[in-house]
Amino acid sequence: MKPTKNRVYIFDTTLRDGEQSPGFSMNLQEKIRFARQLEKLGVDVIEAGFPVASEGDFISVQQIAKEIRKPQIAALARADLKDIDRAWDAIKEAAHPRIHTFISSSDIHLKYQLKKTREQVLAEAVRAVGHAKDLTDNVEFSPMDATRTDKDYLCEMVESVIEAGATTVNIPDTVGYAMPDEMGDLIAYIFAHVKNIHNAIVSVHCHNDLGVAVANTIAALKQGARQIECAVNGIGERAGNASLEEVVMALETRKDILGFSTNIKTRNIYRTSRLLSDITGIPVQPNKAIVGANAFSHESGIHQDGLIKEKITYEIMTPASVGVNDTNIVLGKHSGRHAVKERLKKLGFNLSGEEVDKVFIRFKEVADLKKEVFDEDLEEIISDIIFREPDKYKLLYLNVISGNAAIPTAAVRMEVSGKVIQDAEFGVGPVDATFAAIKKITKTKHSLIKYAVNAITGGTDAQGVVTVQIGYNGYTVSGRGSDPDVLVATAKAYINALNRLETMKNLERRRPEDVSQ
């Protein structure tokens, strides 16, 4: 990439930093599916993972590198020659490969984590970049914990790695410590004191521990940074990363004072956000900027009056600009197959005739249970039928008895590795009884970390979406299920979590060290 005055490059780290956060792990097919959506969104760089971390990470990065052709595909590596070689092996078949290597630079990290001197770390950084440069001309370097690093030492490191061949230098606010003025001043200082800084693109990677990741990112852009590292829905280590949708729409909406442009197709933003929530089972909060359920909702009478007269009175961007429909009601039980197919196309799903038939059968079942079928309902149906991988556990039947004069009892019939098993169990309530029966059949004893119920759409007949998180060997695994019957959705969610856990067990999930940047 050649830096231009007003062009901002979007480096998406949802599949690397985002996927590291508890509850957000994805399997291979889910990662590929999301990477394809990022390609449609128009991101410039996809950081696909950390190949040396595990065999599963290596395979997923390698597969994404083979299948995704438009964006650059980056692989993360510590400033270690074996790490870098492993990263290159994963991405060498990419159309546009990038090696992203890093090492800590702050005295805090050098003293307490690396136990090395500044001179040792600087030498390792230069050697790592030089080695990566022998493999590809596209090398990015990050001095981890840059915002708590001595400025002059940071500048010395940046100048040295650019001299060694780095074409992008990323300045991470690893622990979300900086304030916007500090972040802007640091970028300005680097431009003023690194003599070869214009030979590389300056990037920033801001964490949201103090809630200012987006503000810090924009402050850095104003001082000369031209790549931003961000994640969809703002996911990532601890409090997350700068939110892709928030930064992009801030640049788009306030071009009048910022003057920057990106390659993002903003009408795909909402769809991308929804897909991530669907894959991970983690919904965004209703008041989340840009993609939250309430982002374009207005309840105040004063606001409604203004909107009726002129939308610009209370909307600074249109719902359509990020891919949100003005109306949610789309289909009902009298709708035909053609109407459903056309609606699927508008939502961005190009399904085969056989896949449409499967979706339509399920659509009719849902439509018979509720008066109206919404876009979100269709997305849930597609996720459940089209994109779900073969599962070890399948729900065949659920019957729950509960009430103030009855002992809560759940009878469950399941298919476990092709074998049909049924059993029943008691509980302190209908949900507890459902979980107990499933645990009994599957012979599992995982701790329940989270149980949440949400409605996909409005109305008492809305589909319930249940999110379940269970613990396993220090990991958090999420499951998601949807159904007009909340108890059925509960069973689906728990079983979905168990199936995700089976996938995780088949992968080696070792993380050599914290790589949050």
Image (spheres, rainbow, N blue to C red):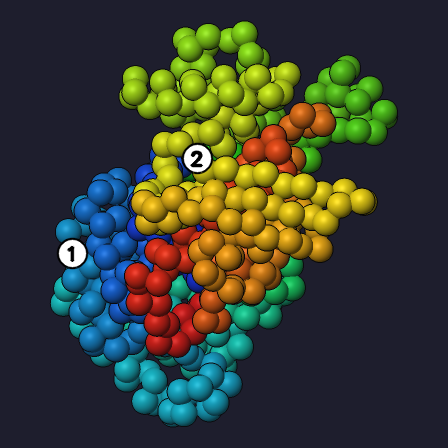
Picture coordinates of residue 344 (x, y %)?
43, 20
Picture coordinates of residue 481 (x, y %)?
53, 41
Above or below, comparing residue 197 to residue 250 in the picture = below
Number of the label disc, if any, that sits on residue 92:
1
Q: Measuring 56% from the left and 65% from the top, which residue is drawn there?
A: 447
- Of label 2 and label 1, which has the lower sequence position? 1
Q: Can see residue 488?
A: yes
Above or below, comparing residue 341 to residue 50 in the picture = above
Picture coordinates of residue 3 (x, y %)?
34, 50
In which quarter of the view is residue 284 placed?
A: top right
Q: Residue furthest right?
A: 302
Contact flag, marks 2 and 1 (Cβ < 8 Å): no
Mark 2 and mark 1: span between their CA atoms? Answer: 34 Å
Quadrant into which the C terminus falls: bottom left
Q: Can see residue 225?
A: no
Number of the label disc, if any, that sits on residue 41:
none
Q: Nearer the viewer, residue 283 or 431?
A: 431
Number of the label disc, if any, that sits on residue 384:
2
Picture coordinates of residue 424 (x, y %)?
56, 49
Circle 2 crowding by C-alpha within 10 Å: few under 14, some 14–19, many from 20? some
Above or below, comparing residue 293 to residue 466 in the picture = above
Circle 1 crowding by C-alpha within 10 Å: few under 14, some 14–19, many from 20? some
Q: Secondary structure at mark 2?
A: helix
